[in-house]
Image (tube, rainbow, N blue to C red):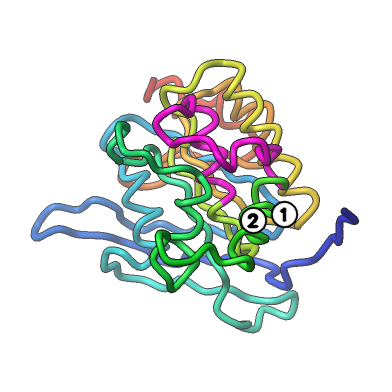
């Protein structure tokens, strides 16, 4: 299969004066970020810092103040972007006889899986799984997948249509080191091949140092942002961790 590289046509994701409140509780305040196309930006911070809340607000799942815009190289707002999302875990009955193929059919076909196996959906599944080096998982039962395999399937699901922005919320939590390395290598290749903007929440500082272009230290507000070495060597990082 010939790989067709593409540009996302989004020069920058701009988050301006962003805040999230729940009643009188301030969860996020005064968040200002510019995230460029092709960058992998890692968000780190203590538990309860508002990291997952930020991703959910970007997805539009929770209300927020401030503006979220996607602009081209001339700083003009362009089309609404496609956003892909990989959650920390997928909740399902591990005893159910559901295969990866079934999961794609449920997601993309308008027909019940016991009525019809949609050839177009099968093509989508094969292409997406191939992108994440998981084509051999198509007919495996979900309950038999390792943690790393399941997260690669979730990553594959997020790639149709190919997103402009990919949000990863602690995607390798509970995955063994081999699975973690494979997942991050796959994500890194996707970023380069498709010029993806990636926002990653992670507690794995070694992986962040290796793969991220930029790091955001968050604890309700931005404490520090910059290149990995700048953040990890900062007073703010040492005070937080």
Q: Separation of disc 1 and disc 2 at Cα?
A: 5 Å
Mark toward the start of the polypeptide (1 vs 2) = 1
Instruction: Give 90 or 208, whichever is nearer the viewer.
Output: 90
Q: Where is residue 93 in the image (x, y as percent from the top left)?
A: 27, 37
Q: Where is residue 100 in the image (x, y as percent from the top left)?
A: 50, 44
**Chief secondary structure of the magenta portion:** helix
Rendering quarter of residue 9: bottom right
Q: Position of residue 145 (x, y in %)?
A: 48, 29
Q: What stretch is highlighted in magenta?
A: 131-156
Tell me whether the residue at label 1 lies in contact with that at label 2, contact meaning CB atoms closer than 8 angstroms.
yes
| 41, above or below 71, in the image | above
Please state, as top left, top right, bottom left or bottom right, where the C terminus lies in the image: top left
Which label is found at residue 38? 1
| 97, above or below 70, in the image | above
Q: How many labels does the image show?
A: 2
Rendering quarter of residue 36: bottom right
- Residue at 36% in and 58% down: 30
| 221, above or below 72, in the image | above
Instruction: Give 197 or 131, whichever is nearer the viewer.
Output: 131
Rendering quarter of residue 97: top left
- Residue at 57% in and 38% down: 152
- Residue at 32% in and 32% down: 94
Outermost residue on the top side: it is 177
Q: In this view, does 222 lie to the left or right of 23?
A: right
- Residue at 30% in and 40% down: 91
Outermost residue on the right side: it is 2
Q: Is residue 64 magenta?
A: no
Q: What element carries label 1?
A: loop
Which label is found at residue 197? 2
């Amino acid at each position: 299969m010939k790989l067709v590289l593409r540009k996302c046509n989004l020069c920058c994701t701009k988050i301006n004066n962003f805040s999230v409140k729940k009643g009188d509780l301030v969860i996020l305040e005064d968040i200002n970020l510019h995230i460029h196309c092709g960058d992998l930006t890692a968000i780190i911070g203590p538990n309860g810092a508002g990291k997952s809340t930020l991703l959910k607000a970007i997805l539009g799942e929770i209300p927020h103040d401030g503006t979220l815009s996607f602009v081209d190289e001339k700083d003009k707002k362009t089309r609404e972007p496609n956003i892909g999302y990989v959650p920390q875990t997928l909740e399902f009955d591990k005893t159910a006889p559901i295969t990866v193929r079934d999961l794609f059919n449920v997601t993309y076909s308008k027909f019940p899986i016991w009525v019809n196996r949609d050839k177009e959906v099968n093509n989508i599944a094969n292409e997406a799984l191939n992108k994440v080096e998981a084509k051999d998982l198509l007919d495996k039962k979900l309950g038999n997948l390792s943690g790393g395999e399941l997260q690669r399937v979730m990553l594959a699901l997020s790639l149709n249509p190919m997103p402009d922005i990919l949000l990863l919320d602690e995607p390798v939590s509970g995955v063994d080191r081999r699975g973690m390395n494979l997942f991050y290598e796959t994500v890194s290749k996707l970023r380069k091949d498709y010029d993806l903007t990636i926002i990653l929440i992670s507690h794995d500082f070694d992986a962040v140092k290796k793969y991220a272009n930029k790091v955001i230290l968050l604890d309700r507000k931005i404490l520090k942002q910059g290149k990995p070495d700048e953040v990890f060597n900062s007073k703010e990082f040492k005070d937080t961790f």
